[in-house]
Amino acid sequence: MQSTPGADGVEALHALVMASLDDDQAVETVSIPLAGKSSIADYMVVASGRSTRQVASMATKLAEKIKAEFGRSPRIEGLPTADWVLIDAGDVIVHLFRPEVRTFYNLERMWSFGEAAGQA
């Protein structure tokens, strides 16, 4: 599958992210639609791993799947410590946390703009 601009490509990328995190047993995965609210991306996905090792593994696998399916390498920040890993795939931004770090930053509340964040 080639990278497709527009809604179909965004939805395919979002579906791949959600499926990958589900396959890797991510905890408390939340998808927040940002289309029309922010120009940074159409979706922000927040999930937790049980350990730094699981967070790093989920991030690496997700980046490999995005590259294989869409032919582009997402930017990854935070992989060496893996307390909080950011994966910027363009239209979908993924934050992977250890639970304590996720609780501290509470990104879902900041980005939900007063609405209930969508649970996956």
Image (cartoon, helix red, strand yellow):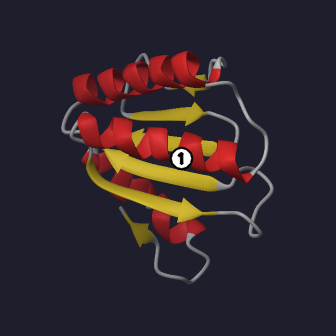
**Side (left or right) of 27 relative to 107:** left
Q: Can residue 90 be seen in this view?
A: yes
Query: Quick one: 17 or 88, which is closer to the camera?
Result: 17
Of residue 89 and residue 102, the one placed in the foreground of this image is 89
Q: Which of 25 and 52 is in front in this view?
A: 25
Quarter-wise, where is residue 19 in the image? top left
Q: Position of residue 32 (x, y in %)?
A: 53, 63
Q: Along the horizontal axis of the image, is 28 left or right of 1? A: left
Tell me if residue 32 comes above or below residue 115 in the rendering: above
Q: Where is residue 105 in the image (x, y as percent from the top left)?
A: 45, 55
Residue at the spot 59% in from the left edge and 66% down from the top edge: 111
In this figure, what is the number of numbered marks? 1
Image spot of residue 103 (x, y percent):
34, 58
Q: In this view, does 75 lie above or below 45?
A: above
Q: Name the residue under label 1.
A: 14
Corner quadrant of residue 84: top left
